[in-house]
Amino acid sequence: MALIAPLMLTLLLGSAELGNYFYDEHKLVKSVRDAARYAARQQFSNFSACSGQVPTEGTPGTVFENTKLMAEKGTLDSTAADILPKWSDAGASFDATMTCVTSLDDGAGGTYNLGGIYANVSAPTVVVTVSLPYRSIIGTAFGFSGRGFTLNATQSAAVVGL
């Protein structure tokens, strides 16, 4: 028992830590997916620049700030609890950018023009990217802080202007 207990304890704690890492990453991917979907449902007029940053960073109530709230809290209520801790850490980053296309590669060396609601317009696509430092659940008690481990998620969604 004295020989096997340390190994079994290490396996148990390591499994719990690894499970927590994947669970936190899953929650982050889901929140980023929801944020990209939220931004993609905004009016086309909010994406007139059609390249670069989603408008307007730093101004509450804008597409950028509301998208950030959706990723961080899962709601537009700024007083709600964060989905994951460490959103306010110096190592955390959030970015929402957009690109536009008017045609796509047809896979045979040619291109085709977009149709439907994207006919005769540039189709904006929102890309939401989040990076958060990982928060260890049990490692700090045993000397593993989790520093250096980062949770990353990126999701894109075509703006449909609903």
Image (cartoon, rainbow, N blue to C red):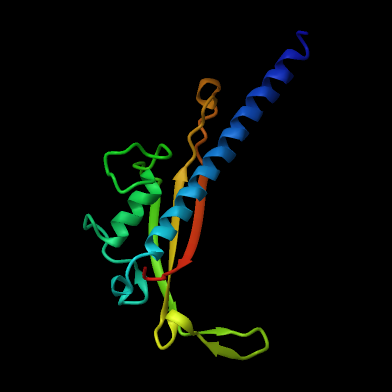
The residue positioned 58% from the left and 89% from the top of the image is: 111
The residue positioned 37% from the left and 43% from the top of the image is: 87
* Residue 20 percent location from the top left of the image: 56, 33
Q: With 142 as the anchor, is 71 left or right in this view?
A: left
Pick whichever, 131 or 160, lies toward us.
160
* Residue 5 percent location from the top left of the image: 73, 13
Pick whichever, 149 or 120, lies toward us.
120
The residue positioned 68% from the left and 18% from the top of the image is: 9
Res. 149 visible in picture: no
> Quick check: 44 above or below 74?
below
* Residue 145 percent location from the top left of the image: 50, 31
Res. 104 visible in picture: yes
Quadrant (top left, top right, bottom left, bottom right) of the N terminus:
top right
Q: With 19 as the anchor, is 39 left or right in this view?
A: left
Quadrant (top left, top right, bottom left, bottom right) of the C terminus:
bottom left
> Quick check: 132 above or below 33?
above
The residue positioned 45% from the left and 45% from the top of the image is: 132
Farthest residue, direction bottom:
110
* Residue 89 percent location from the top left of the image: 36, 41
